[in-house]
Image: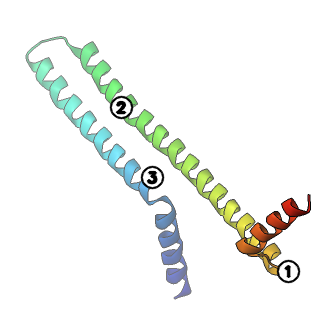
Amino acid sequence: MFGFALKSTMIYMFWNKFQKQIITTIISLVSIVIIFAIYEDINNILIQKQLNYSFELVTIKWVLISIIIIFNIYNFKKSIKEKENHNSIEELTVIDKLQHKEILNKKKLKTKSDVILQKYLDKKND
């Protein structure tokens, strides 16, 4: 009973964390399978007609597959950079929380008018 709940929770967490990468990978795999199927069909047609364009056909097939792989690598690196930026934003919010604690722990808080008045008095004393 708990095994199903644990597996479901793990799948849900994994899906939420890597949803974009999973969808992109599935679409890429489907497109590669389609490319192989089209290659086989065209290759069979060319063999039946006794035409020899196999080098060009193989080149086109592997160029398309390379483009798909490069696109996936680019998206993966981009997502890693976005996560790093997200982590740095979280670090900034932690710093802001620390600054808020410092302000709250001060014995005397000054308003803007107090600061302006202090500057005016300092200039007057000089």
Per the model, the C-alpha gap separating discs 3 and 2 is: 17 Å
Q: First in sequence, mark 3 or 2: give its number.
A: 3
Residue at the image point whose x is 20% and y is 33% from the top: 38
Residue 14 drawn at (x, y percent): 51, 65
- Between 54 and 32, the residue placed more toward the observer is 32
- Looking at the rendered structure, the kind of residue marked 1 is Lys
Residue at the image point whose x is 42% and y is 55% from the top: 20
Q: Decide: is 78 above or below 115.
A: above
Q: Which residue is mark 2?
A: 65
Q: Decide: is 15 above or below 38.
A: below
Labelled disc at residue 21: 3
- Give the number of the mark in front: 2 or 1: 1
* SS at mark 1 in the image: loop
Residue 77 drawn at (x, y percent): 54, 42
Whether pointer 3 and pointer 2 mark residues with C-beta atoms closer than 8 Å, the reply is no
Residue at the image point whose x is 91% and y is 63% from the top: 125
Per the model, the C-alpha gap separating discs 1 and 3 is: 52 Å
Residue 15 drawn at (x, y percent): 46, 65
* SS at mark 3 in the image: helix
Q: Which residue is mark 1?
A: 108
- Looking at the rendered structure, the kind of residue marked 3 is Gln
- Label 1 Cα neighbours within 10 Å, binned few <14 / some 14-19 / many ≥20: few
Residue 114 falls left or right of residue 22:
right
Q: First in sequence, mark 2 or 1: give its number.
A: 2
- Between 50 and 119, the residue placed more toward the observer is 119
Residue at the image point whose x is 52% and y is 70% from the top: 13
- Looking at the rendered structure, the kind of residue marked 2 is Ile
Q: First in sequence, mark 1 or 3: give its number.
A: 3
Per the model, the C-alpha gap separating discs 2 and 1 is: 66 Å
- Label 2 Cα neighbours within 10 Å, binned few <14 / some 14-19 / many ≥20: some
